[in-house]
Image (cartoon, helix red, strand yellow):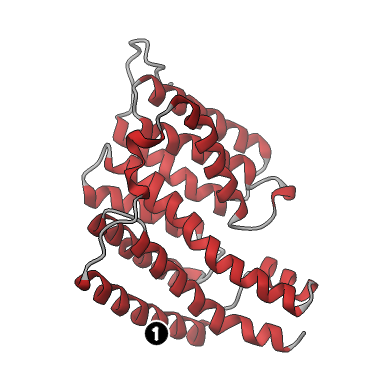
Amino acid sequence: MVGHGDGTKLPMTPALIAATVILLAGAAVAWPVGWPIAAVVVVFLLTVTLWANRRDDLALRDAAALSAALWILIRLPVVGIWPLPAALALVAVIVLTGPRGTLSRWRKWFRVGTIGPSTRLLCAVIVVLTAVALLVWQQSTDGGLPSTYTGLIDSVPTPVAIAGIFLFLVVNGAVEDSVWSGVLLTAARGTMPAPVAIAVTVLSFGIAHLDGVPNGPIGVVMVIAWGIVLSLLRLRTGGMLATYIAHVLADATIVALLVPSLLSTK
């Protein structure tokens, strides 16, 4: 049992609690369990939220609340497909914590960050390597989009599908970076050394993409490597702009590789 700030001893260290919260965020996306198990997980996460709030650990509190919201929203059919559940989870956390005036106390990760010439060059190299890796993955595994996305593209007129694809490119990177490179990595950095914090966060990121793009064993390794790159960019620049640009360009590469063939058959 996790204590609620009333002097109860904790059987787990804050670092282990934070790691569990972060890994559960990835499992919320990839683990299609029913409501009974999900309810147990949500109760645990809400307990951690209350405990972290009493400790004034705002980063861990919001990470736990975000993870709990993901476990709930991802299982509601009305919410729709990714990244909408994550976007709504972020909004829920902001709404719940905003009235207390705590938004500015720890969300320094949401800054634009400093992007110098070396960072721009690094981003360019990363984008090229990402494009090559995705091309190799697609050619070697004959990988494609998840059936949810292909079915959606097939079910709407081509102009609507194209508009939806561009909306996805704009939103997905911002949402995923805010969840993993922002909220979760910040919580991890509050209780763990940087290398451990990055490792836990990118493992959660990889778990969340088990059925995403790229998928399969090779795809998961690629996503974890990509998560390390995004985390290092975030820490190097002190903000989110570099990670967002890199993420959007990577998603654009996926779209360029996988979507044209779908649109040509409509």
Give percent across and percent down for residue 3: 39, 18
> Front-most of 206 and 100?
100
The correct choice, above or below, for 116 with respect to 261 in the image is: above
The correct choice, above or below, for 27 with respect to 118 in the image is: above
Is residue 44 visible in this depiction of the protein? Answer: no
Give percent across and percent down for residue 217: 46, 69
Residue at (74%, 79%) from the top-left corner? 158
Label 1 crowding class (10 Å Cα cut-off): few <14, some 14-19, many 20+?
Answer: few
In what element is the residue under mark 1?
Answer: helix
Quarter placement of the C terminus: bottom right
Residue at (25%, 77%) from the top-left corner? 121
**Rendering quarter of residue 88:** top right
Give percent across and percent down for residue 243: 36, 63
In the image: residue 43, left or right of residue 191: right
Residue at (48%, 30%) from the top-left corner? 97
In the image: residue 107, left or right of residue 259: left
**What residue would you read off at disc 1?**
132
> Front-most of 101 and 121?
101
Quarter placement of the N terminus: top left
> Front-most of 31 and 265?
265
Q: Check disc 1 and give the amino acid type.
A: Val
Is residue 35 visible in this depiction of the protein? Answer: yes
**Rendering quarter of residue 122:** bottom left
The correct choice, above or below, for 29 with respect to 34 in the image is: below
The correct choice, above or below, for 9 with respect to 94 in the image is: above
Give percent across and percent down for residue 210: 52, 62
Q: How many marks?
A: 1
> Front-most of 97 and 264?
97
